[in-house]
Amino acid sequence: MTAPVVEQPTDWTEPGAHPVAAGVHRVPLPLPIPSLHAVNVYVIEDAAGLVVIDSGWAMPDARASLADGLRSLGHRLDDVTQFLVTHAHWDHYSQALALRESFGTRVRIGRGERPSIEAFDTSKGLHPRQVELLRRCGADALAAEIAGMAVQRSEQDVPHTLPDAWLDDGERVALGGRGLDVFATPGHTRGHVVLRDAAAGLLFAGDHVLPHITPSIGLETEPERKPLRSYLDSLRLVRGMPDTLLLPAHGPVAPSVHTRVDQLLEHHAERLDAAAERVRAGCRTAFEVAAAMPWTRRRRALSDLDAFSRMLAVLEIDAHLDVLTDQGVLDAHEDGAGRGGPGVRRYAPRA
């Protein structure tokens, strides 16, 4: 069942509480990340109290925007009984923890996020594991650049503690007037979940399916070993369900989950083919492959991107090359392991 799309503002980031279905409102909140523009949280008005899916970044502007959105619906922040969070990235999780400190609000998140939540420590830098992986990709200079990035104030002060309870794959969250089915969708993070209201025809998709951008893969404190393989499997899982309205964390509401999932699967199939072709042309590391490929819709060179975007690009290619190795398209081996750090992983076409 696909619910009809309720008319939305032309600019999806416009502040306010925008109805998307009976008893469900979308509230976009500001972010300190200009490229993402905003993050949508979804307010469910339930007989037992307000339930909010995702929460925003713990910062004053986001708190004020959420309070304003709730006020327009006749509610206050302390009317929220629980947050159901799709994953542990700060723009989804941290404000729930801050509001728990203020009001005792219950917070739940996917069980698979536990390793990254427990390992989080800004004293080690923002992306210590990614620095290691970049070195394995043959990107030593970029790894040093990322390791040297200063931790910003908005990142230092963000709360990042354990939730009150976990959300488990296959669980049904029973609310007063509806039920939300929990599905584990690892890939973007290892513990990402989506919540599905089958009766209303809604999928609260978090960052798993986004209407305008391709989600990053495995950007977390403790990434899993095969993030792209998991992500593609998770896309196919959602594609196998009856179609619903797409309620994404970033971007406008879209009429069909299936349509966007098909586009994402096609995108990754094209990137797998392109990455394999670069290896056949002589590139041997993930960094060399990434440097030989265009990026963003503007088809920019890797060197034209900022350091954070270059990191995401190189690690995305590493994940694609890993899938190609699993598929038997490429061979891989590591050079230099055991010399005080990870070896460089090199690829070649399988004979």
Image (cartoon, rainbow, N blue to C red):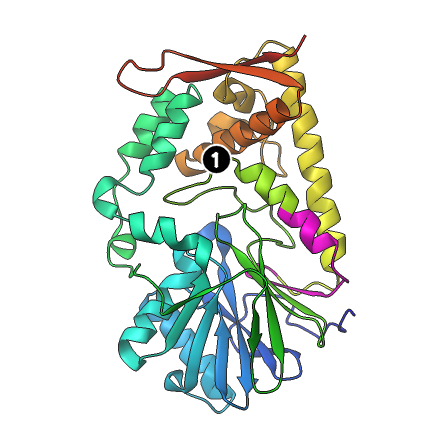
Q: Which residue is mark 1?
A: 225
Q: Residue at x 64, y 10 (%)?
A: 281
Residue 158 percent across, percent down from the top left: 29, 59
Q: Is residue 57 visible?
A: no
Q: Residue at x 28, y 13 (%)?
A: 339
Q: Residue at x 56, y 82 (%)?
A: 175
Reply above or below: 162 against 98.
above
Quadrant of the image containing the N terminus: bottom right
Residue 86 percent across, percent down from the top left: 50, 61
- How many numbered discs? 1
Which residue occupies the foreground of this view, 182 or 17? 182
> Magenta region: which residues?
234-251
Residue most toward the left? 123
- On the image, which quarter does residue 247 sit in? bottom right
Residue 164 percent across, percent down from the top left: 36, 70
Label 1 secondary element: loop
Q: Is residue 213 visible?
A: yes
Which three-letter amino acid code belongs to the residue tagged 1? Answer: Arg
Q: Is residue 337 magenta?
A: no
Left/right placement of residue 37 relative to residue 7 reads left
Q: Residue at x 30, y 20 (%)?
A: 341
- On the image, which quarter does residue 348 sit in? top right
